[in-house]
Image: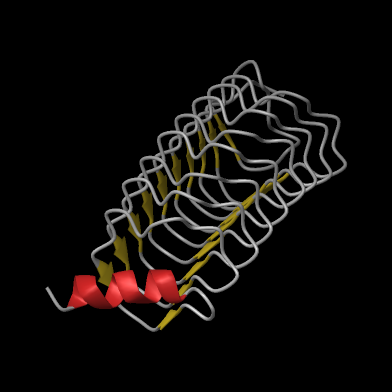
Amino acid sequence: MAKSVVAFSLNEFDPSYTRVYVGNADFEKTQITNLGTLEVITGNAYFDDSQIESLGKLTTIKGDAYFDDSQIESLGNLTTIEGNAYFGDSQIESLGKLTTIKGNADFGNSQILNLGNLTTINGGAYFRYSQVKSLGNLTTIGGFADFRGSQVKDLGKLTTIEGNAYFDDSQIESLGNLTTIGGYAEFGVRTDLKSEWEKRKNK
């Protein structure tokens, strides 16, 4: 079979040559360990229960990305996930160069400690039972934000939560730069955060 820059199936995929994978890429139970020259996956990417350890030159996933139960420790050059991102029970500790997740982001039960260069989550963000302590450079969450049972203490540069925000049973020390909650804010026993938010709204 002639080598192709574009692959439409895993049978056509060659990590030393392929740059674009068209459609959903399911690496589960394959023998592929490195994505090599691959730069774009146009559909969903399934890394769960795969042998892949490195994303190589991959920069963009145009669908959902499933990293749960994967062996990947670093996102490498990945900058954009246009769908949802699932990190539960993965080995990833930092999001590295990733700047944008256009869908929901599920950090629950993940090992991620650092959000790296991530600035935008267009969907909801689930931090429940995650190890993330600071939101770092993240400025916008376009959907809900669930901090219940999380390790998050510092909201970093976060200014906007477009959906509901759940702060009850959280370790957050201050609302920081947060100026907008588009939906309902649940504080529960965190009367300190509730008072801080009410004063901020009344300014």
**Left of 151 or right of it: where is 78?**
left
**Left of 3 or right of it: where is 145?**
left
- State the residue at coordinates (55%, 45%): 133
Numbered-mark total? 0
Q: Is residue 162 above or below residue 27?
A: below
Give the quarter of the figure containing the N terminus. Answer: top right
Give the quarter of the figure containing the C terminus. Answer: bottom left
**Left of 166 or right of it: where is 12?**
right
**Left of 69 or right of it: where is 147?**
left
Residue 51: quadrant of the picture = top right
Colour mode?
A: secondary structure
Q: Is residue 149 above or below residue 182?
A: above
Residue 196 percent coordinates (x, y):
31, 69
32, 139: nearer the viewer: 139
115, 67: nearer the viewer: 115
157, 142: nearer the viewer: 157
Residue 73 percent coordinates (x, y):
69, 29
- State the residue at coordinates (74%, 43%): 90
